[in-house]
Amino acid sequence: MGLLFHRLTSGDDGVVLRLRVRATGAEERLTARALTSRCGRVVQALAERGVRPGQRVGVWAQGTLDTLVALTATAVGGYVTVPLDPKLGPLELGHLAKDAQPVVALASDPEAVAGRLSGVPVLGVPAGEAALTTHRAVDDEPLLILYTSGTTGLPKGAVLSARNVAFNLDALAQAWGWTRADVVVHALPLFHVHGLVLGLYGSLRNGAGLDWLPRFSPEVVEDALSPIGGEGKVLFAVPTMYHRLADAAENSQELVAALQSARLLISGSAALPLRDHQRLHRLTGRRVLERYGLTETLINTAVLPGSESEAGRVGQPLEGVELRLVDDARQPLASFDDATIGEVAVRGPHVFLGYLNRPDATAAVKDEGGWYYTGDLATRRADGSVRIVGRRATDLIKCGGYKVGAGEVEAALLEHPQVREAAVVGRPDADLGEKIVAFVVTSGDTTPAALQDFVAKQLSPHKRPREVRVVDSLPRNAMGKVQKAKLP
Ligand code: MCA
Ligand code: AMP
């Protein structure tokens, strides 16, 4: 498999990274040659500070071109990258500092994050250039630690190796025909698989480059997709973004034309409702292709170009991905009838190394044979194509494509002095897929808005309940356990 990022080995003058901010009209670019030498300088600066390959380096994922440089440099330099959401709250930050213990963190605006990750010095992304003397090979060592929420407790750090990432990106390149002719456009955050691994690292391994839009709006996507005499681009987005694009396209021929110009429209991170599939097809004549994955496994299945869309249908296993459906005892089900429901289990070189410092949690999801149990419920057709129909854990909520554990939000609410009891659930929402709804029993005169703000400050704001309902009591069973199914 050779080196991790083919795009950096050429050192040509093609634009490899472009960043657009609609509000300011700003557009910044870097060529492959410039990116390579910017990375050389970052690696040099880390070495000057005594940071050695294999050590963990945090990168604050701020909305700048320098963030893309830092995330590329830590990868090619052989460090273990820990991407950090600049909006992490104190509950998450305290845990992350102790759990991942990065030796240093890079930030394009160090002042904005100084002191947030206790004990971790912050280094600005150096501006100069230097020869890049290291180039990460596809090895089995950790490349990334990505924090992901579970049903209870604090987020876990999923450790992914360079081989996990390279193998998966190669399989996606094959499925989508992703080549050096493709520029990816996305407006996703850079601290999750979708925006970072597929968007940035995928473009550096497979494609011509990435157009990154640090803030999503239909208008900025329209600008970025519009071809200037060149090839169509590939759009990566979560269903909430496609929903908002469909809304905006109802009244904008320019946006319709921009979407029509794309070579591929790819959706993932959550289910794209059939209604939005159909609306986008009606408006543009184009099909949105779904792919299905998890932080721990990267991408497992993808709908191939030219296929029809169907609710929940996420395509066939990628090349090299073993996939089966299992029953409650984790025994394989033989059915391919598109009716029998089982849990999706996967095996292959894309499955993560494990959770950082959590062998117990790793053993709960990955067995000795290498099978990873996703918790997602699905059916399967004779051609192997998978349809996701639900999820085992009702305490996992997918809101706007972000995974949020109900337990984490409940724990944050219970930190509030006037909250006596809290139960958090996901409720269907046309825009967000699922919205986070909290039922609380309070002992004072706090308001729903105050509790939303409170959670938005303790945790990343996207984990805040979009609705808070104050109730007299929570339904409980004889053992005192909250019965969430009985909540209104
Ligand atoms: C609102 N905000 C607040 C409050 N209310 N801040 C503090 N206190 C409050 N009470 C702020 C937010 O911080 C944010 O600030 C702004 O208001 C809007 O935030 P929000 O309402 O959360 O945004 P949204 O409009 O709902 O966002 C929709 C979105 C977003 C853009 C689609 O959900 C998104 O980017 N989703 C992508 C998730 C993703 O990448 N998932 C991939 C996981 P400001 O305006 O300053 O920003 S990887 C994965 O799932 C697997 C592997 C896979 O298959 O891909
Ligand atoms: P995360 O841990 O944030 O990576 O989220 C992984 C979860 O997102 C999976 O277990 C699925 O429940 C969900 N998911 C990702 N892609 C899709 C998709 N195309 N359709 C339905 N669910 C999806």
Image (cartoon, helix red, strand yellow):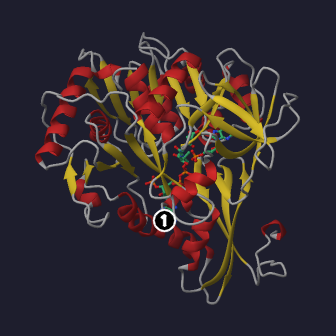
- Name the amino acid type tagged 1: Leu
Q: Residue at x 28, y 27 (%)?
A: 29
Q: In the visual, does 390 lie left or right of 81?
A: right
User: Which quadrant of the view contains residue 388?
Assistant: top right
Q: Secondary structure at mark 1?
A: loop
Circle 1 residues within 10 Å: few <14, some 14–19, many ≥20: many
**Which residue is the site of mark 1?**
459
User: Which quadrant of the view contains residue 378?
Assistant: top right
Percent of width and height locating residue 165: 46, 32
Percent of width and height locating residue 223: 45, 27
Whether residue 252 is visible to the viewer of this picture, yes or no, is no
Percent of width and height locating residue 288: 65, 26
Q: In the visual, does 77 lie left or right of 465?
A: left
Percent of width and height locating residue 51: 19, 48
Whether residue 98 is visible to the viewer of this picture, yes or no, is yes
Out of 312 and 371, give the one closest to the viewer.
371
Q: Residue at x 72, y 39 (%)?
A: 344
Name above or below for residue 282 compared with residue 62: above
